[in-house]
Image (cartoon, rainbow, N blue to C red):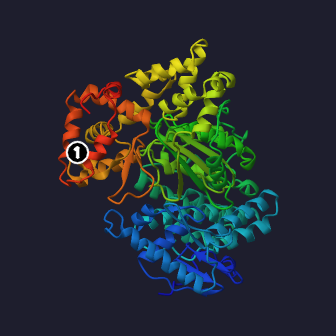
Amino acid sequence: MILPICNGYSSLNTGRPHEGGDDNGREVFFRILGPLEATIHGKQIRVGRNRQLTVLAALLLNANRVVPINSLIDAVWRSAPPATADRQIQTCVWRLRNAFTAAGAPVDLIETEQGGYRIRLDEEDLDAHAFEKAVRRARELATAGDLESASAEYQRALAFYRGQPLADIPGPLTYAVAAHWEERRFSVLEEWLDIGLTLGRHAELISELKPLVAEYPMRERLCAQLMTALYQSQRRAEALSVYRNSRLAQIKNLGLEPSTGLQELHQKILAGEPIAPPPAAVVHRPWQCVKVPAQLPPRTKDFTGRHDLLQHITSDLRADSGPRVVALAGCGGTGKTALAIHAGLLLQQHFPDGQLYADLRGQTDPAHPQEVLNGFLDAFGVPESRIPAGLAARAALFRSITASKRLLIVLDDVAESTRYEALLPSGESAVLCTGRTSLLKIPGLTEYRVDGLPTDEALDLLASLVGVKRLFAEVDSAQRIVELCGHLPLAIRAAGARLRARPHCTLRSFTDRLATQQDRIAELSIGSLDMGARLDSTLGQLSSAAYRLWLRLSMCDVDSVPEWMASAVSDRPGEDTQRLLDTLVNVHLLAVTPGQAPDGPTYSFNPLVRDHARQRATTELGSLAGQDVVNRIALAPCERESAASVVSAGHRSDEERTVYGTQAV
């Protein structure tokens, strides 16, 4: 099909052409503020209906950000994808690339990234980006007092609208997008109308405002603008009629009287008093911010390593166009919060409008987004009396305030259940969040897994805690401590704290104590450095079936558990077991072992996490559970020849098995 062009969307009768619609000379240009349209060197490009259109729309809505394949699958098929969904998505992307490349677009327009795809666009290559750029310029001109130029720039921005956004693509993907851009269009339109009223164009604006107010009688700002235009044009009776109609609509639909501001305007018109023009020069600023927020906690003094990961994170957050969202996911104790704060502080100069921080307490007592937004709005100097009560209203106000700002927002400990979208800013801001569950289901998010430290970085961290001289006197023992800590920063910090409290204790004796300690994780917990509490809060989110499988998997005495072995020790059918494994991977209590095994994926534990699981398994499953695991593997229906050898090869000595508390294994 040829992507259609829709003629005009704005009701503006400006007497000027759609300047925003002029993409002549652009190498690549896409439209989403109307039916989806792709133009290469001035020519429309044929794009297949349905799947290809939806995939392209999802990429454009998240331009310059990686869109995970799972998000594309959800966008195309929603809750019922076919078994070949991932391959069909690959085919759609391949066909889009071919169509664009054949028309002369750059070959790297759509890039393949780990786990997804990214479409790379300049600010002027997408009508939505060009719209936002024009709005920023209009506001700058208005603030500078050049209202004529500001009005023209607002008109240029509004001309980008050519119908309902993505009107030719039905489904949930576009419903929310259409609502967002419709609200965005209205807010900008109202700003343009305020400029016109300030310039004294009352009679001209009446024809623009009347149909809008007739269609949206409860938008009080539009009603106030029409009342002002009519009153200033010596049409007082009509102005009063507009108020009556708006009041009746609000009472009928909401059971509420109009706002105080609209009532005051009505009283002034009744009394024949003069009406001051709106303060158009600062119309986009509801109030002046009293300060630039700088809420990031202080940098961890002994933060160590993560150089490559830091480079990826800061590079993604510094991307030039559009909002950026980066997530750090990993099990408790991997140092995600310290990494996020360190990255945020490194980027302070890149976000001159401030940094916001919120601990969402996702694993303990989740903070409500409404509460978080209240803190953010307060940080920008919004008076308590002006903060709306509802979540949607607070989110809208937050987006309005941040639309012209460049902020960094760090959201710590995000849970899957968090209504995360309400906390997203507008404009050129960026978001960095951490969580113990994967957040890839959020469209447009780039996620990095945070695991234990490499050995050299783990030793550097331990040396910063116990002293370089003490560590290098017993390097072998230090390496063993790091291994017994599972390379997890929190556990290493706890080990360092215990060694610092025992200056005469050798690293060798501390290593021996850890190696023979049945509840090793308790020995590696001190004060707030409580690895057990971090893990237990994650375990509390699991279903009983997932938790039981996790315990039984820890008793499989092999480095990596193949899928068939997990099915053998599970109490569930194969498909249920796979879903439970996915859950455990999602909350980072298991990891998919790198590399593709011939018989399917294999799963591994962090050593310290497995120690904790085994200690719990001994207590909760009983002394015979270990032997039951061995029997299930040996009698697995798949009758794999290697089963017995794998299990026996992975067995530890009786002494070591006693350490784990699974004597039967």
Q: Position of residue 115 (x, y in %)?
A: 48, 61
Locate the C terminus and report the quarter of the image it occupies. Answer: top left
Tell me, yes or no, if residue 316 can be seen here. Answer: yes
Amino acid type, callout 1 = Ile
Q: Is residue 641 left or right of residue 429?
A: left
Q: Position of residue 37 (x, y in %)?
A: 55, 79
Tell me: residue 250, above or below residue 21.
Answer: above
Q: Residue at x 65, y 31 (%)?
A: 300
**Considering depth in this image, is 593 or 285 the residue closer to the camera?**
593
Tell me, yes or no, if residue 570 can be seen here. Answer: no
Tell me: residue 405, above or below residue 480.
Answer: below
Q: Is residue 616 left or right of residue 447?
A: left
Q: Is residue 438 left or right of residue 549?
A: right
Q: Residue at x 67, y 32 (%)?
A: 298
**Considering depth in this image, is 298 or 102 the residue closer to the camera?**
102
Q: Secondary structure at mark 1?
A: helix
Tell me: residue 296, above or below residue 19.
Answer: above
**Considering depth in this image, is 502 or 435 the residue closer to the camera?**
502
Q: Position of residue 197 (x, y in %)?
A: 71, 64
Residue assigned mark 1: 633
Q: Quadrant of residue 72?
A: bottom left
Q: Residue at x 64, y 57 (%)?
A: 427
User: How many neighbours does mark 1 have within 10 angstroms: few (below 14), some (14-19), or many (20 or more)?
Assistant: many
